[in-house]
Amino acid sequence: MRELSVENLARVEGHGGITVTLDGKKVKSVTLDVHEGPRLIEQLVKGMRPEDDLNVIPRICAICTLSHRYAAIRGLEKALAIKPSEKTQLTRDLMMLGENVESNSLHTMLLALPDFLGYPSAIAMLNDYADDVKRALRLKKFGNRVMEITSGRIVHGENPVVGGFGKYPSKKALEEIKVKSRELIPDAIRVIELFGSLEYPAYSEAESLFMSVNAPKKEYGFAGDTILVSNGKETSAEDYKKLTNERVVTHSFAKRSLYQDKPFTVGANARMINMGKRLDGQAADFFKEHYSDKWLKNPLYNDLAQAIEELWSLEHMPEVCDRIGSLEDTPIEKPTRTTGSGTGAVEAPRGTLYHHYDIKDGLIDVADIITPTAQNLDDIEKHMKLTAERMLADDKKDEEVRLGLEMVARAYDPCISCATHMVTLKRI
Amino acid sequence: MTRQSPKVGVYGFTGCAGDQLMILNCEDQLVDLFGATEIRSFLMAKSDNHEGELDVAFVEGSISTDHQEKKLKDIRARSKVLIAIGGCACVGGPQAMMVGDGKWEERFKKVYGNAKITVAKPNEAKPIDAIVKVDIYIPGCPIDKSEFLNAVSKLVAGKHPYLYQFPVCNECRWKENPCILYAGKFCGGPLTKAGCGAICPTLGLPCVGCWGPTDDLNVTSEYQLLKEKGYDPDEVMKKLRKFGGAKLAELVKDIEKKGAKA
């Protein structure tokens, strides 16, 4: 028996590693180990007022800060029977587009791409790919700027609150987003072309199931009240527990998710599989050009899916800005009841995120948060095990197997802080 | 004489990785930053990391396992200057909000049940100065880009960085915002470290206290003033505990002691 391990998985958010246990050439197990410490956030927000909960929970993760905030807002507003105004709704859409551009450009170009091109980091690529690294930084910076304009700060902005916004973006700021989002479209297209030209090793291929929200009005989008499964089923977000089936496994402290006893995928590829036909603009053309059955098997295509999605987010911004600008500011809506329950589901860049709240007499009684990375963990391990088996059968060297496994794990754009907002995973 | 570029390490423990992300969010300066310093270790950004002697270590996150404690001590032992970045490293962060209430084990059990933990021993989250000596604190949730870059350029030039020593109220006055406290809503401004630019009050929202308690000497009188204005001290503490962590618990004990004497 021997172990082949990646002690510290680099270029992901949070701290994790990979351990492969081998018996000769036979792969006994592959685990994604998480070295994060426990935080117990769901327990800590118990007894808090909704507005205080909303300050704390985005701190579960910096990269998905607005997704956490928005999922919580959706859950809390349902629980308190608040109906947000159209202007509020559209401004939330805009902040999600900003987070999508920021996170997708960071993940595709700066975290995932170096593997494909054989570099240890994006900074190391500067000599040979200066234009592309700078392009990624431009896109990321703009995504951050949209987040800053809508939420008040690049990371952990407090402007989006239950019932509305502290202050709506100014006409000038909306104009800035409109102009800049159009300017950056060639950059986003170059990112798609780059990822469209890469070779995606087939070692990890396996059938899977894909879940995402069903955005309203048959449009593509990042929030919805029902969840689509790639087998054609649709379920209310309120029944999220039936979809995610969180369970404790004996070999770790992380809770895992299975759907009908099978691992499943959430993320940009799942969104494309479930809602890709709804894309419009140039993003729709690139989707038609690149989408194939391989996306249903090979998690590495999540990188290409993120690139296409990023273009859609940019293309969509001017229209959303125009609509926000045409509406009058509305005051923050007040709760119409003090006791109730609600589940908010949004698409974080790395997949579906659920926040469920039970509120009793104005205070949080139960908070339940299920993150995309926690849902993906079983699926990541399934694809990593196949990758290890097939690469070893192909006589690949340990170094190559390590890189192959890292690429699979990284393709899911894992957010380990998110996955361990309450648990820590360790191998025994 | 040419100055050698300092050897730098960036590390993260329990938290949201937001402070490391803020370093990566310095898009306009990132290339220069990697040029002016020798980044020896930065796991979130690169794969080729080398753990050895460092001139400066930036450490994010609170410490909540024995394994992390060991790793932090190792970083301290090989770093000339150790800088805590962000609220979790400086004061413990949201996960330390109920520190010292004696109920941590109960909460832990509610999440984990009776699962057997054999690899790392989890603990209630602590700020890093509960384990090692910290030379410089850069507060914030997350840290502010300009405060971070300012600190780095001072360090590259061999100087000590200057950080804000006053509460958010000062910044709020500079922005000429109407006072939220006078509108009858509790605002964390008077008791919270400045540096964010009073973002929340500028948006018409109360300061949530995310930069942690201020070192300002007037904090006792400001706390008393809030009491006099009719703000319930328990509510005030409940609000500020979200980000004040271990430090706020100490501060309040201190204030109450002084209050009892007065």
Image: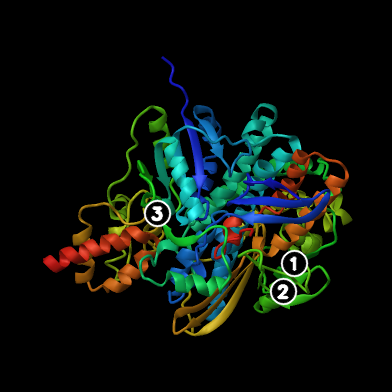
Q: Which amino acid is tagged 3?
A: Pro
Task: Categorize mark 3 by other alpha carbons within 10 Å: few (<14), some (14-19), many (20+).
Answer: many
The x, y position of residue B199, in whole percent, is: 40, 55
Most extreme residue toward the front is: A1
Q: Which amino acid is tagged 2?
A: Leu
Tell which circle, 1 or 2, labels the residue nearer the N-terminal end: 1
**SS at mark 3?**
loop
Q: Any mark on residue B159, and which?
A: none
Q: Which residue is mark 3?
A: B127
Q: Is residue B15 above or below residue A341?
A: above
- Give the CA separation, mark 1 to mark 3: 38 Å
The x, y position of residue B138, in whole percent, is: 39, 45
- Is residue B73 among the parts visible in the rendering? yes
Q: Any mark on residue A243, and which?
A: 2
**SS at mark 2?**
helix
The part of the image, by quadrant, that contains residue A341 is bottom right
Q: Residue at x 64, y 30 (%)?
A: A126
User: Is mark 1 in CB contact (under 8 Å) with mark 2?
Assistant: yes
Q: Chain of mark 1?
A: A
User: Which label sits in the foreground, 3 or 2?
Assistant: 3
